[in-house]
Image (cartoon, rainbow, N blue to C red):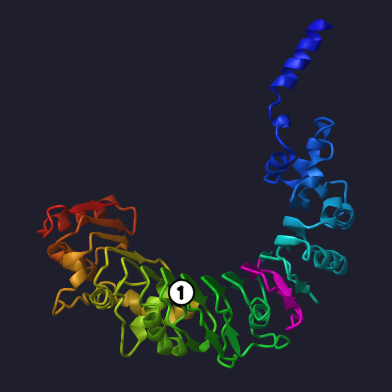
Amino acid sequence: MGKRRKQRKAAVDRDVISSLPDEILCDILSFLPTRTSVATSVLSRRWRYLWKKVQVFDLNDDFLYTPDRSHEKAQERLLILLNEFEPLRRPMRKFRLSCRAGVFRYADLLDWIHYVIRRVSELYFSLRTDGKICALPSLRIRSTSLVSLVLDGNIDIYLEDVGPSSVILPSLKNLELHINYLNLDVFLSGCPALETLRATLIKFRTDESYDEPEAIHMPRPLKSLTFEEQYSYFEDATLEHLEVDTPSLEYLRLRLRGCYKQILTCDYPNINKVCLDIFGNSWHVAWLPKLLGALCKTRFLRLEVPTTLCLIRAPVLDLPDFCNLIQLQLDFYSFNSRLVIDLLHNCPKLQALKIYESESVDDDDDDDSWLFCQNRKRNDWTQPLSVPNCIVSHLNTVEYRGYLNSPEEHEFTAYILQRGLVLKTMRIHAKYCDLPLKGEVFKALSKIQRSSSMCRLEVH
């Protein structure tokens, strides 16, 4: 017995973690799923009720779905568990719930969310639909304490009946929406202090039961905006106005597939990073140069395939001076040297140029696909009348992915090698894993005399 007591005492002495204060132990438990933190109650008398003091609730209902339990019973068990969970009767820091939809009793679930949302600072709610379209009616989101909100519906959730009085979030700083349909303008009107917005929406405009907003107004305090929508477009669809009057904006990502008649912008003195993926219809072609002008102070810029197509289609290309730009990425369906040179002329401090040639474009661009395929072997290279300043003073890295070794690509690459006085790296990634092609590209480019003795040619 004496030996066993010594072993037990030694084990207790080694249990350093139990000697920590409750506050630190609760912080440790807050990084664990709620089921795991509850399981620690069996460790000792000290741990029995410790989990109830944790300020983070994180529950996934997967463990309730067993072979011997129907989905209806599993969802009933979840509601019972939620309603009996004692810590939620007091304010909490973070609440995270991921559950399945289906035959769920939405009224009970929404009542519970309405109760919880007033007691947490951060809320993450994910409703997995398993590919089914679900509608959540009468969702009221009102809280003076909520700072961060994430609604993730697997892109299969509709939020109906969201009126001006449905959303009142005066303290909200961070908002993420990944759902199917929402009147975003009405929702954002209840978030006057918003600083970070990530919204991914899909809406099919053939259904006339949903009102189309005439405009979308982004909150003025925004510092980071990611707005991605995949609206199916029809010629008789309502045209929208997008207002981004956000002078504190630092990060912008726009992915627009709908039809926006115009975009209202302001001066963005703090803009640092921009990514534009804008479908090239006639309305967008008209206002895209204006948007680029407003974003001209950015340091990092990426123009994805639909955007470059949009610029190529423009009858007159009026580009601004990107006075602070140090990295430019251009995504093409088919390389266009004219657009690249025009942009380089307006980027005096550019240090890194990335060109990515995509393998496909959107279905809406099928007419362009045939044309570009016909032009792949043509040489549309035109020798610039003057050398862009960035090529001789700042450009040190050029990376080209999807290189086909077309005449136009070769002429452009040779131009950069011959005139890039400070060029350090020319990195070429062939479009296909074809060793003879890579060898041919390397041999052809190696023969070109380089202006920079530091330049290293890489062909992958």
The kind of residue on which mark 1 rests is Asp
Residue found 34% across the figure and 57% down from its top:
432
Q: Is residue 348 left or right of residue 26?
A: left
Q: Secondary structure at mark 1?
A: strand
Residue at 74 percent of width and 80 percent of height: 162
- Residue at (58%, 81%) from the top-left corner? 232
Q: Which residue is mark 1?
A: 277
Placement of the N terminus among the 4 image quadrants = top right
Give the left or right position of residue 28, taking residue 101 as reference: left
Res 237 quadrant in image: bottom right
Q: Which residues are magenta?
A: 154-178
Residue 126 versus residue 146: which sits nearer the camera? 146
* Residue farthest along the bottom direction in this orientation: 236
In this rendering, the answer to whether 48 lies above or below 396 is: above
Residue 346's spot in the image, x, y percent? 26, 77
Residue 12 can be seen, yes or no: yes
Let me know if residue 313 is in the magenta part. Answer: no
